[in-house]
Amino acid sequence: MFSGGRAPRPHAGGKPPDPRPPRCFAALADPRLALLGDRAPGPPPRCFAALAGPRPGIAGRRLAASQPWRVPFPRVFVCHAPGVAREVVFVVFDGMTMLDVSGPAEVFAEANKAGADYSISYVSPSGDAVMTSVGIRLGVDGTPADVRAPDTVVVAGGDVLATHPISPELVDAVLVLWPLARRLVSICTGAFVLAAAGALSGRRATTHWRRAGRLGRGYPDVEVVADAIFVEDRGVFTSAGVSAGMDLALALVERDYGADLARAVARDLVMFMQRPGGQSQFSAPLRVRAPRASVLREVVDLVSAQPALDHSARVLAARAGVSARHLARLFATEMDTTPARFVEQVRLDHAKVLLDAGHGVARAAREAGFGSSETMRRVFVARLGVSPSEYRSRMSGTVG
């Protein structure tokens, strides 16, 4: 019932070959899976668990996460069969942030009222109820091993994930569920669990802005996008802190059931339809602590108040009465950035405020200090993944 067999060996001195077969079939014994005659569009998940038979052990899953070409397990592609509910599985644990689960779950539940078909369940590594961040005990439906064919796996966040080593049980939960799911999602610091499981290796990801630096330092193979509300990279979705998980859930609903249904959900939940994933979590002046050095404080205040001025390193240093090299050291030491990077971020945030208010791209570029629409477009695409025009059109659809 499953295609696969012996996995090819990697070419000597070169990139390992794609271990996936050209044609792949789902388990006919499971009515939740549809038969795929050809490779599904887009990158399918690295799936090696036979849904109708025994699954490989944790050691095999760990090997697959890092070296998939060495795993001789059969591989299947999971797709959604019409008329069958999309199963959303939340992975929870003691100390998880309640809103990281209740917020996205409410979006999926509200979508069901509007005509969607989601089945929502909760699992913990042990199968026991968990204590949430607000002191409410949350019951679960079982363990990850009890889940057969999830559509979406959501890993909740929690303060402990960014301050303590990730428990092997949580890593194993991801390794059990990830290969079976169409998409893998983390909310807030749940990204640390995905990173520990190897799911973010070589991918772009985000997390709560306070924890973004720690994520990047702890997992240098992850490209951390510290400023985004949510990020998608080849079927793996990560979101920023708490309420951003609802924005991501709404975006998933729109992908599954279209903009009209998602708009109805947003209206009922009094949400924006919708904050684009690339939107900043906050503005540049809020992002940094007030510098200790008075010289640096003056520079930061000036750039924030008048982004359209000439803020080249030479000019900023002259205004501060220090050398350009000394100013660069102050930025690096106190703000973990460069003068140019800070100026660009302030201008980007200022431009977004102007676009959010309905101003045109040319005016936003001029008043934010980019000089030209093309320069601003390049910065938007590089930092947010969308053009100014696309950002403006997305933000124009607020719900009332």
Image: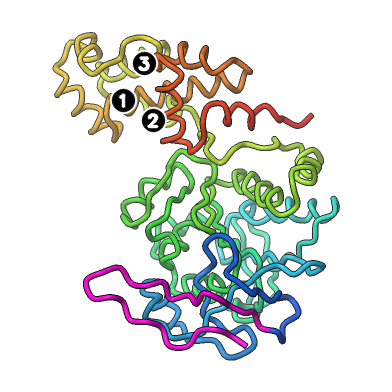
Q: Label 1: which residue?
A: 291
State the image coordinates of residue 315 (x, y, percent, origin top left). 23, 11
Q: Are marks 3 and 2 in contact (CB under 8 Å)?
A: no
**Which of the 4 quarters of the picture holds residue 319?**
top left
Disc 3 and disc 1: Cα gap in Å? 14 Å
Give the magenta range: 1-27
| Disc 2 packing (10 Å; few <14; some 14–19; many ≥20) | few
Q: Splitting the image into 4 quarters, where does residue 222 fall?
A: bottom left
Q: Which residue is mark 3?
A: 303
Q: Are marks 3 and 1 in contact (CB under 8 Å)?
A: no
Q: Residue at x 42, y 61 (%)?
A: 195
**Quadrant location of the C terminus in the rendered image:** top right
23 and 197: which is toward the camera = 23
Q: Nearer the viewer, residue 49 or 191?
A: 49
Residue 216: percent from the left, percent from the top? 35, 50
- Residue 288 located within the stretch drawn in magenta: no
Q: Secondary structure at mark 2?
A: loop
Give the residue at x 45% y 64%. 199
Residue 2 counted in the magenta span: yes
Query: Circle 2 is placed at which residue position?
Result: 288
Spatial CA span between label 1 and label 2? 8 Å
Q: Is residue 155 above or below residue 205?
A: below
Compared with 171, 56 (above or below) is: below
